[in-house]
């Protein structure tokens, strides 16, 4: 059994209200934990699928993308959902719809986004330190370095659009996980969109908080300034648009009270237009009859 889309929408509102009401230290810890989970998930796929040979990656890009996305990265969101984390990209969706529905204030939604973003960063950087301290990547870092450099070599517009698509899939993964009522269903619901996101090669601002700094530690030719300007800022903008507008605004229009009010106004407008047309038609007929007489 699964929740209906309307029930998922209502559960999203309740989740946002719960986070806003949580004490700040708890919210920070939830965000830090989520950043750590993202680092664990990415490292799993980078150290397994990413260590397929560069020759194979170039000769069989489709097969490489499939193998790379199959292993590891969905783990990050699975841990966040099952362990009760707070991820910025999911908050882009939930904070907007909760504010539109009056469940939280706009300022409370903005606070949620700011706290989750910076606490996610702390969690990601903590994992960078742990992986570096454990000497996990040396000798197995060729794809990580390639990916960090590639992410910071794209144009702003490209990163923004990839960020939009990335967070559409992430928010839809959370939607499916919320709809499922058992652990297996939640895992499958998360796995499919995140596998799609990873194999396509999109831009997730929180994942990049781990990927690029970890690559820099391993010797990627990227400066902090270049990372922030060329990747982190446009990816964040794209992620907000993807979560808030492409998923949030659409779901509010379909399942929420803002949509219901808009459709009611539309129906009133259509009814009024029909009434005016009938009145105009009747007036024309009366004039025609008068002219004939």
Image: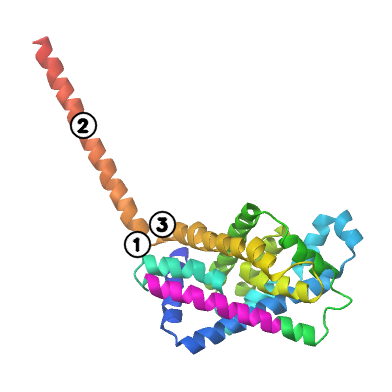
- Residues in magenta? 106-127
Q: Main secondary structure of the magenta part?
A: helix
Residue underneath mark 3: 253
Residue 123 is drawn in which quadrant? Answer: bottom right
Q: Residue sitting at 41 percent across and 83 percent down?
A: 21
Residue underneath mark 1: 257
Could you tell whether 29 is left or right of 212 in the image?
A: left
Residue 62 is drawn in which quadrant? Answer: bottom right
CA distance for labels 2 and 3? 31 Å
Q: Is residue 199 magenta?
A: no
Answer whether residue 81 is visible to the viewer in this image.
no
CA distance for labels 1 and 2? 31 Å
CA distance for labels 1 and 3? 8 Å
Q: Dot 2: few (<14), some (14–19), or many (≥20) neighbours within 10 Å?
A: few
Image height of 200 relative to 16, above or below: above
Q: Nearer the viewer, residue 132 or 226?
A: 226
Q: Is residue 122 magenta?
A: yes
Identify the element where label 2 is drawn: helix
Could you tell whether 80 is left or right of 62 in the image?
A: left
Residue 14's spot in the image, x, y percent?
42, 76
Residue 59's spot in the image, x, y percent?
89, 54
Q: Nearer the viewer, residue 96 or 159?
A: 159
Pick whichever of labels 2 and 3 is earlier in the sequence.
Answer: 3
Image height of 277 relative to 24, above or below: above
Residue underneath mark 2: 278
Could you tell whether 251 is left or right of 265 in the image?
A: right
């Amino acid at each position: 059994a699964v929740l209906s889309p309307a029930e998922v929408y209502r559960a999203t509102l309740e989740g946002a209200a719960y986070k806003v009401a949580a004490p700040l230290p708890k919210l920070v810890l939830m965000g830090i934990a989520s950043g750590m989970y993202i680092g664990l998930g990415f490292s799993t796929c980078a150290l397994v699928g990413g260590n397929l040979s560069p020759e194979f990656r170039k000769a069989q890009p489709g097969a490489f993308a499939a193998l790379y996305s199959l292993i590891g990265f969905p783990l990050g969101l699975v841990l966040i959902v099952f362990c009760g984390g707070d991820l910025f990209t999911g908050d882009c969706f939930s904070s907007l719809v909760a504010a539109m529905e009056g469940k939280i204030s706009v300022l409370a939604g903005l606070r949620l986004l700011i706290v989750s973003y910076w606490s996610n960063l702390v969690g990601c950087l903590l994992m960078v330190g742990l992986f570096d301290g454990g000497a996990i990547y040396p000798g197995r870092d060729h794809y990580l370095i390639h990916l960090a450099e590639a992410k910071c070599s794209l144009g702003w517009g490209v990163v923004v659009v990839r960020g939009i698509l990335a967070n559409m899939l992430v928010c839809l993964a959370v939607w499916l996980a919320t709809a499922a009522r058992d652990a297996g269903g939640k895992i499958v619901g998360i796995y499919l969109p995140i596998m799609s996101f990873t194999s396509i090669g999109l831009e997730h601002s929180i994942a990049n908080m781990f990927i690029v700094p970890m690559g820099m530690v391993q010797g990627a030719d990227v400066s902090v300034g270049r990372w922030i300007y060329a990747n982190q800022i446009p990816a964040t903008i794209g992620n907000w648009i993807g979560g808030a507008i492409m998923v949030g605004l659409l779901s509010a229009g379909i399942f929420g009270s803002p949509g219901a009010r808009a459709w009611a106004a539309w129906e009133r407008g259509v009814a009024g237009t029909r009434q005016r047309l009938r009145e105009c038609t009747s007036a024309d007929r009366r004039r025609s009859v008068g002219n004939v007489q």
